[in-house]
Amino acid sequence: MRALTKALVGATAAVGIAVGGLATTGTAMAAPAPAQQRTVSTEAAPLAVVNLGLSTAQATDWQCQLRVLGYTPGTIDGRLGSDSWKAAQRFFNDLGLKAGKPDGIVGANTVMALQRFLNMNLKENLKVDGVAGAQTKAAFAEYANLLRSIC
C-alpha cells in the first residue's frame, strides 16, 4: 500500500507539473501567477500509467493479450494507461469479475477483478480486497510472464 501511495503522489505531482507547464506556455515574460491560480486539482484525473509492478515487457505482453482477445488497449507500449485499463475492465466485466464501469481508473473494483482473475488463472489464493499489494503484483507479473508467446 505504501508503494501505491508513493506512486500516486509521484504521478499526481507529475500531472500537476505538466498541466501547470502547459497552462503557462508562452508567458515566459509575464509575472508569475498567484499561488491560488497555479494550483491544479487532480482529484478526478486518472493516473497516467499504472503498471502495478509489471516491467515494460510484461505490461506489453498484457496489452498484447488484451488486443488478441478483441479488447482495445491503445498503443502497445508497455505503459498501462487509461486505455489499457479500460480494455482490462471490459475484459474483466465480460468474464463476470465485476470491475465496475470501464473508466480507466485502477480503483478497488478493478484490483478486486484482477485478483479474482489471477485466482482463477493461476490457482492463487489472493485475498480479494481491492489492494494491489506485493502478492497481487507478484501474481500479476507471474501471469504476464506466461504471456510471452502470445505476441
Image (cartoon, rainbow, N blue to C red):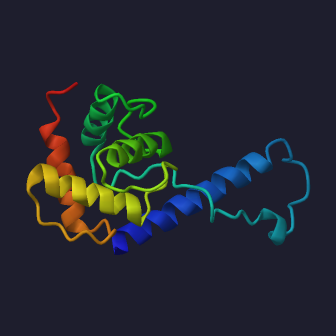
Answer with the quarter of the image where residue 59 lies. top left
Q: Is residue 109 left or right of residue 15?
A: left
Residue shown at 41%/34% (left/top)? 73
Residue shown at 36%/75% (left/top)? 2
Position in image of residue 13 (x %, y %): 58, 62
Answer with the quarter of the image where residue 62 lies. top left
Q: Is residue 98 left or right of residue 115?
A: right
Q: Is residue 52 left or right of residue 103?
A: left
Position in image of residue 89 (x %, y %): 40, 48
Front residue of this view, candidates 86 and 10: 86
List the single residue furthest toward the bottom.
2
Q: Is residue 137 left or right of residue 109?
A: left
Total labels: the figure holds 0
Residue shown at 16%/58% (left/top)? 119
The correct choice, above or below, for 118 with respect to 94 in the image is below
List the single residue furthest toward the right.
30
Position in image of residue 142 (x %, y %): 14, 50
Residue shown at 31%/63% (left/top)? 112
Placement of the N terminus among the 4 image quadrants: bottom left
Placement of the C terminus among the 4 image quadrants: top left
Position in image of residue 102 (x %, y %): 48, 48
The correct choice, above or below, for 7 with respect to 81 in the image is below
The correct choice, above or below, for 56 with respect to 44 in the image is above
